Amino acid sequence: MPKVTVYDTTGAPVGEMDLRDDVFGVEVNEALLHQAVVRYLANQRQGTVATKNRALVRGGGRKPWRQKGTGRARHGSIRSPLWRKGGVVFGPQPRDFSLGLPRQARRQAMKSALSAKVRDGEMIVVSELNLEKPKTKEMAGILNNLKAKKPLIVTSDGDKNVYLSARNIEGVGVTRALDLNVYDLLTHDHLVITRDAVTRVEEVLSRG
């Protein structure tokens, strides 16, 4: 059973916490992590880019000049892609880029990412993270005490003061336990998570 040290906001150890083997101690599946990241990035794409083909370009209802006798090349419409301001050939059209991944695979990918953080010593558990008011300087001091580099801060529930205090610090991300995803875990060097958030994550990922 993995065991991690619990720190307070001054960076001093205040105890230890046992982690569930089936959440924080699984074998890291790098191929599954790659699939999860590709899915996440694909699902962020809006797919709303579009160009007008010759059917959508305005004008061109009549033949620009007669077929023969002018000495010019024959044309049937000014909407032809050959013309300036004509339609675009094979241009991008709105599409759905979203990818699917079975629920069990998504959960296993999350477990792999969390286990990798524990294995590499990049998971920092804090007893609590309460700020009386938004204060960026105070949050920066806490992260410095914890020696957290480019951290992802995870709280049990959305904490507005924590979010407002950390959002202007370069490289720092803030999320709540239920919104945790593989991409954020892999793109941040350290995971700073509260004790309550660890419990919440274990409750969710240990289900069926």
Image: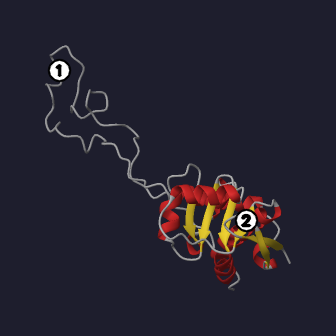
Quadrant in which the C terminus is drawn: bottom right
Q: Using residue 26 as the reference point, say whether residue 190 is left or right of it.
A: left
Q: Residue furthest top?
A: 71
Indicate whether 45 appears above or below 73: below
Of discs 1 and 2, which sits in the foreground? 2
Percent x, y of residue 78:
21, 31
Indicate whether 32 appears above or below 72: below
- How far apart, in angstroms, are the residues tagged by discs 1 and 2? 80 Å
Q: Which residue is mark 1?
A: 68
Q: Element under label 2?
A: strand
Q: Which residue is mark 2?
A: 124
Indicate whether 80 appears above or below 151: above
Query: Viewer-proximal residue, 202 or 174?
Result: 174
Which class describes the residues within 10 Å of circle 2: few (<14), some (14-19), or many (20+)?
Answer: many
Residue occupying the point 49% across, 57% down? 44
Q: Residue furthest right?
A: 1
Residue occupying the point 17% across, 20% down? 68
Query: Viewer-proximal residue, 191 or 53?
Result: 191
Percent x, y of residue 143:
65, 58
Which class describes the residues within 10 Å of circle 1: few (<14), some (14-19), or many (20+)?
Answer: few
Q: Is residue 37 visible?
A: no
Which of the marked residues, 1 or 2, is nearer the chain's N terminus? 1
Q: Is residue 5 visible?
A: yes
Kindly identify the amino acid type of the residue bearing the numbered disc 1. Answer: Lys
Q: Residue 115 has which mark?
A: none
